Amino acid sequence: MKTKAAVLRDVGKPFEIVELDLDGPREGEVLIKYTAAGLCHSDLHLTDGDLPPRFPIIGGHEGAGIIEEVGPGVTKVAPGDHVVCSFIPNCGTCRYCSTGRQNLCDMGATILQGSMPDGTFRFRADGEDIGAMCMLGTFSERATISQHSVVKVDDWLPLETAVVVGCGVPSGWGTAVNAGDVRAGDTVVVYGIGGLGINAVQGAVQAGAKYVVVVDPLEFKREKALEFGATHAFADADEAQAKITELTWGQGADAALILVGTVDETVVAKATAAIGKGGTVVITGLADPAKLTVHVSGADLTLNEKTIKGTLFGSANPQYDIVRLLRLYDAGKLKLDELITRRYSLEQVNEGYQDLRDGKNIRGVIVHD
């Protein structure tokens, strides 16, 4: 069949809207009609060269839609089911899935290559294989994907809103609740208020943090963080540090959560200085893997028992946590509609990412025709 998609062909190039050939589902695969796709900063790492994939590749790793067809052996979903896609596939049986760490599933090894787990492709143009970001390629009207990349969700939920729970919401919320282990009465500082950082604020608030201090250079984002429950907001990390010292009587924050678009050694150093004894720094944001972005005093870590750790997907289990977060939303306990600043058509994908770069959006969403 034919499908329209937004394709990246090289670093520094814009998305091209093209028509592609799409193969139907094979063993263990499903055909999905996407209704919405999130504009997440991680796709900019492809265009900026921080995480170079195999080109050409269809962008988009946040997706929601309706299953149209299933291949042999598919047991998780059926045609007509509403699903949210997990950008990390989860097989359920590997070492990591079977020990409750679905976010580290071995199937995630090919997400930047853009192929299916067996190394083959389902998209092509003029005989050339086209990859799909995170095995999903949600900037396409339709896609053939693994059944292990979908999570069935309640069909009364609006998919144009539920789509953000495929990456940004669990990655941010879980940074606070899971990786950061934020507890009632804690003081938390969040660096970067984008699609992930705003959900780290929500997670910290729900976990019962006494103070949630945010750091972001953009006034719009600081104001939005306060609407979502942050107690203090600063444009400068040093100003935030001074306030944390005051609020905690000099003890420092319990957790510092780094969710800036591109992590560098400065923000890691500021976060490590902001936490007190026994505190934890969690790094969720990405950077070029070849760059060494953690430069801190080993003596500080040892003498004050500080921890610096990374987290993928907020250390969440997609099959459980995507449903859990959506039911929190359904119960009025989690803000999702308020996250979405603007909706775009597929043809407006480059405009949407420019808006993200310009700091105009907390989260943009593509709505497919």
Image: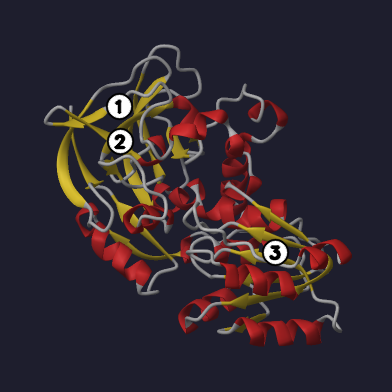
Residues at discs 2 and 1 in contact (Cβ within 8 Å): yes
- Find residue 225 and report its image quarter: bottom right
Residue of label 3 = 204
Residue of label 2 = 131
Helix, strand or loop status at disc 3: helix
What kind of residue is marked 3?
Answer: Ala
Residue of label 1 = 121
In the rendered view of the protein, which quadrant contains the N terminus? Answer: top left
What kind of residue is marked 1?
Answer: Phe
- Frontmost of labels 2 and 3 is 2
Q: Neighbour class for label 3 at 10 Å: few (<14), some, many (≥20)?
A: many
CA separation in Å, label 2 and label 3? 36 Å
Q: Neighbour class for label 2 at 10 Å: few (<14), some, many (≥20)?
A: many
- Frontmost of labels 1 and 3 is 1
Query: Which sits earlier in the primary sequence, circle 1 or circle 3?
Result: 1
What kind of residue is marked 2?
Answer: Gly
In the image, taking residue 82 as reference, residue 237 lies left or right, namely right
- Numbered mark located on residue 149 in the image: none
Query: Which sits earlier in the primary sequence, circle 2 or circle 3?
Result: 2
Helix, strand or loop status at disc 2: strand
Residues at discs 1 and 3 in contact (Cβ within 8 Å): no
- Find residue 211 and report its image quarter: bottom right
Residue most extreme to the top: 72
- Find residue 207 and report its image quarter: bottom right
CA separation in Å, label 1 and label 3? 40 Å
